[in-house]
Amino acid sequence: MAAGSQGDAHAAAVTTGPAPLRNIEVWRISAAIGLLCFPQVAVLTFASVFLHDFAGTGTWVTSATLAAVQTGAMVMRVWSGRYTDRHRNRRPFLRFCSALSALAFLVLWVLAIAAARQPSLLLLLPLMMIVAGICVSAWHGVAYTELATLAGAGHVGTALSLANTLVFVGFCLVPIAIPWLLLLFAWPGVWLAAAICAAIAWPIFLRTA
């Protein structure tokens, strides 16, 4: 009976606090996660098209670029999780990732504009794509851990489901939106939109209290 009472007490303890759908901080973190997925999905779904059609890269360079993005992102996710566990600085790290991603996509935007006038700059586009792709993919574990910690053990399922719903909204909308951005603003407009999404995520990761 004592063990059962302790289990009930523990269950009650971990479910204290507002429910996730009534917790503005849970909504904020979930929204920021969803926003950062927009530029990430843009890289994963359209980087090969951009490099082939705009930069004129061949199959080997395009494949190597995407492999470098994915490999770098995997390494950075593990490293960032360990780093923030040790330093207890998840929010500052998430803001840093947002700001760095916004800067990387801004540079990609400028390079895309400049390369249209100076073809020699096309050689820099695969490298910049790797940098931007890794920056905007390195934050996953840290963001989900911060969200779970914020929601509390008794509400983790709801909080993570909310974030995943917003992520898959991005997975749905980005492939629809990018062809229209291409039609209206060409490739520089795509990368500028990615930079804006990452920049909007930065203040959302600030604590409200």
Image: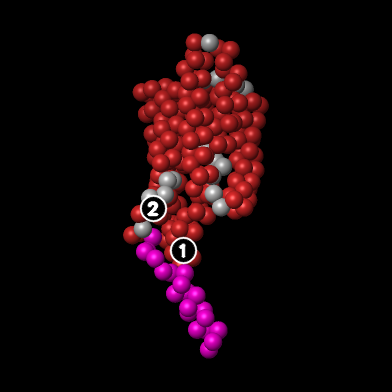
- Residue position for label 2: 209
Whether 126 is among the magenta residues is no
- Residue position for label 1: 152
The residue sitting at 59% across, 31% down in the picture is: 130
Labelled pair 1, 2 in contact (Cβ < 8 Å): no
Q: Is residue 178 visible?
A: no
| Above-or-below relation of 11 to 175 | below
* Amino acid type of the residue tagged 1 in the rendering: Gly
Q: Viewer-proximal residue, 154 or 61?
A: 154
Residue 190: percent from left, percent from top: 43, 28
Q: CA distance from mark 1 to mark 2?
A: 17 Å
| Above-or-below relation of 151 to 77 | below
Magenta: predominant secondary structure element?
A: helix
> Image check: 201 left or right of 73?
left
Rate crowding at label 2 as few (under 14), some (14 to 19) or many (20 or more) other CA atoms within 10 Å: few
Q: Viewer-proximal residue, 144 or 122?
A: 144
Q: Give the extent of the magenta segment.
A: 1-20
Q: Is residue 193 visible?
A: yes
The circle on residue 21 is none
Q: How many marks?
A: 2
Query: Is label 1 or label 2 in front?
Result: 2
**Farthest residue, direction bottom:** 1
The residue sitting at 38% across, 50% down in the picture is: 208
* Type of colouring: secondary structure
Residue 48: percent from left, percent from top: 55, 29
Rate crowding at label 1 as few (under 14), some (14 to 19) or many (20 or more) other CA atoms within 10 Å: many
Helix, strand or loop under label 1: loop
The residue sitting at 50% across, 54% down in the picture is: 146
The residue sitting at 54% across, 41% down in the picture is: 137
* Sooner in the amino-acid sequence: mark 1 or mark 2: 1
